[in-house]
């Protein structure tokens, strides 16, 4: 080399190309690819498209609430489903077939999911706070008592107690399924997994029937608002958790989970346990203490 002013290029085929005073010299060398435990995600169109889809869903909801025709907004539903499928397909390919989800990436995903559960806990805490505030300092408008005068509460020993047993049993069965998967017995894991899905569907059915039989609605004062906001929000989380479990069950049947690598299933199980714990709080505070 004459000086640092000489140009130096490195090609992608493992050779260095030098330019000395207009003359080209090629030197081949052996090199190893430097691996990093982090995953630098490739540019993807799905976040932008999903944002547009969510805008369309929000517009549909606003039109539905205000009784406006939705004929021009139905395109958002199939586009949302297609975008969601494509995005999840790419994530599965990166995690299962390309090996990009290293232990470092999995730890980051786990930490992010824990923070998500904490935010969900704060959401439920805000509605619990409203319930406690109304119950412990009842206003004159509701008769200075709790529950309000003239309101017939639901019997905790019937449907609510049955739902509690269903959710506790589902948490036990999904934990058992997880253990069998770690032990390598996928068929027993699948059987207990199916039992969990059946219990969750029974819970959703019971909750719907409870709403149908209830003598009060969400518009019946602060008690009805707090009751239906808490139980309805929890019901939506149960539906979401059930969809997540179904998704992981399909992946497990496609042998995309191993006894060592199944972070998606682990996070889905954590979410289901979170839903179970929130329901126990609802059962003891709303149905027993609050009534």
Image (cartoon, helix red, strand yellow):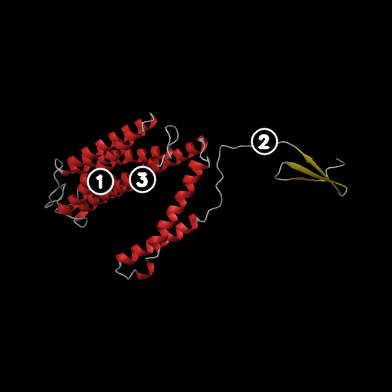
The residue that disc 1 covers is: 201
Residue occupying image coordinates x 21% and y 45%: 135
Cβ atoms at labels 1 and 3 below 8 Å apart: no
* Mark 1 surroundings within 10 Å by alpha-carbon count, few (fewer than 14), some (14 through 19), many (20 or more): some
Which of these two is toward me, 18 or 148?
Answer: 18
When asked about the image quadrant of residue 271, the answer is top left
Nearer-N-terminus badge (2/3): 2
Nearer-N-terminus badge (1/3): 1
Image quadrant in which the C terminus is located: top left
**Residue 40, percent across and down?**
56, 45
Q: Which type of secondary structure does the marked residue at label 1 adopt?
A: helix
Q: Which type of secondary structure does the marked residue at label 3 adopt?
A: helix
The residue that disc 3 covers is: 244
Image quadrant in which the N terminus is located: top right
The residue that disc 2 covers is: 32
Residue occupying image coordinates x 79% and y 40%: 27
Measured along the vertical axis of the image, is residue 68 above or below residue 227?
below
When asked about the image quadrant of residue 71, the answer is bottom left
Residue occupying image coordinates x 46% and y 45%: 92
> In the rendering, which numbered label is found on residue 65?
none
* Mark 3 surroundings within 10 Å by alpha-carbon count, few (fewer than 14), some (14 through 19), many (20 or more): some
**Residue 3, percent across and down?**
86, 42
Which of these two is toward me, 229 or 14?
Answer: 14
């Amino acid at each position: 080399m004459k000086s640092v002013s000489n140009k130096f290029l490195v090609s992608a085929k493992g050779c260095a190309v030098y330019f000395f005073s207009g003359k080209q010299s090629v030197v081949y060398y052996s090199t190893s690819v430097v691996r990093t435990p982090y995953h630098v995600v490739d540019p993807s169109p799905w976040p932008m498209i999903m944002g547009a889809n969510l805008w369309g869903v929000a517009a549909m909801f606003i039109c539905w609430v205000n009784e406006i025709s939705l004929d021009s907004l139905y395109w958002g539903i199939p586009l949302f489903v297609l975008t969601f499928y494509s995005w999840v397909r790419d994530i599965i390919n990166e995690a299962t077939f390309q090996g990009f989800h290293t232990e470092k990436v999995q730890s980051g995903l786990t930490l992010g999911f824990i923070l998500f559960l904490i935010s969900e806990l704060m959401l439920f805490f805000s509605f619990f706070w409203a319930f406690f505030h109304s119950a412990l300092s009842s206003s004159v408008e509701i008769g200075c008592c709790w529950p309000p005068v003239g309101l017939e509460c639901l019997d905790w020993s019937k449907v609510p107690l049955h739902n509690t047993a269903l959710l506790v049993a589902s948490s036990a069965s999904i934990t058992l399924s997880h253990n069998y998967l770690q032990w390598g017995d996928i068929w027993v894991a699948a059987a207990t997994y199916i039992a969990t899905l059946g219990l969750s569907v029974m819970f959703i059915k019971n909750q719907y029937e409870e709403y149908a039989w209830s003598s009060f609605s969400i518009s019946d004062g602060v008690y009805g608002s707090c009751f239906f906001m808490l139980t309805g929000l929890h019901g939506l989380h149960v539906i979401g958790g059930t969809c997540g479990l179904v998704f992981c069950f399909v992946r497990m049947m496609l042998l995309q989970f191993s006894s060592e690598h199944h972070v998606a299933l682990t996070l889905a199980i954590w979410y289901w346990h979170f839903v179970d714990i929130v329901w126990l709080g609802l059962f003891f505070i709303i149905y027993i203490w609050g009534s």
